[in-house]
Image (spheres, rainbow, N blue to C red):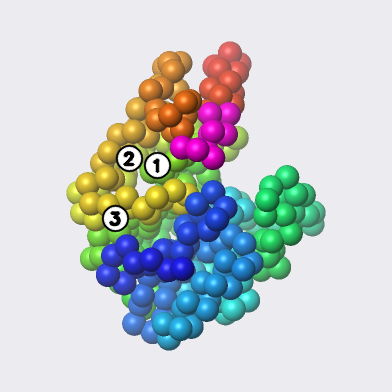
Amino acid sequence: MLKQVAEGVLVHESEFVQSNAIVVRGRTGVLLIDPGVQDHEMACLATDLSELGQTVVAGFSTHPDWDHLLWHPRFGTAPRYGTARCATAVREQLSDPGAKDEIAAHLLETEIAGKVPLDLYGLITALPAGTAELPWDGPQVRIIEHQAHAPGHAALFIEELGVLVAGDMLSDVLVPMLDLNGTADPIEDYLTALRLLEGVAGNVGAVVPGHGSVGGAGEVHARIEQDRAYVIALRDGKDPSDPRIGPSAKPGWEWVSDVHAGQRHRLAQRSEHA
């Protein structure tokens, strides 16, 4: 079911880790951001759009993680954009003929095994490097590209509507997940990304994370500060005081503590090797 979070902006939440698909109304159709995750959920989203008399005229993937690269035949053949670095990462991934099989095998360990359509996976059109605005017939969508979490990650800021689509950042249930493979300084990359988001935060009335709850007016600053405190604690080798991990974690999200432990371990290893 689509829920309106601002005038002309609607969100469809998946059962799988509260994944958010975002719909932005344009003049001739809608922009669809990070649609997912299960086949029946995307079919439901397509039905909702049809009942609203809307067609998809553009898509966007905020970053090259598998759950942000999905598509459904009923969405049509509109161009699906990503940053140049995002598209390069996807192209490299799909150069392995077994890439989709690996995703399917990974999903066998989850409750959504066999429920994720991969036929149209990763068909991303690269925007020219440095593109600042999404090319589409709708409200101006500013692209805020950074290197936190994944190569070519981008947040989208719809300024006139006051909506920040944050990708896999600013979640109320997930701690910051660093890119520990593809960057020389994942800590500083993440802090830089938070500063970029902070630069628009004063005009944000709703923040939509890739996973978790939509934040209302005023919450974006608190989420930025919470993420920054977590990353700085990791940098300094301290235990973060963060409600998303440990005994205060939201029921069903206890596994985020394992993500934190893994990040802390790998950062310690990087420090030893340095």
Query: In the figure, is residue 49 to the left or right of 103?
Result: left
Q: Residue at x 59, y 60 (%)?
A: 37
User: Range of the magenta residues?
Assistant: 250-259
**Residue 172 numbered mark, or none:** 1
Which residue occupies the foreground of this view, 57 or 247? 247
The residue identified by callout 2 is 223
Q: Can you tell which quarter of the image residue 175 is in? A: top left
The residue identified by callout 3 is 206
Q: How far is disc 2 from disc 3 in space, using C-alphas?
A: 12 Å
User: In this rendering, is residue 174 above or below 98?
Assistant: above
Q: Amino acid at mark 3?
A: Ala
Q: Is residue 88 visible?
A: no
Q: Is residue 18 visible?
A: yes
Residue 90 position within the rendered picture, expressed as x and y whole percent measured from the top left: 62, 55
Q: Amino acid at mark 2?
A: Arg
Which SS class for mark 3?
strand
Q: How far is disc 1 from disc 3 in space, using C-alphas?
A: 13 Å
Which residue occupies the foreground of this view, 19 or 273? 19
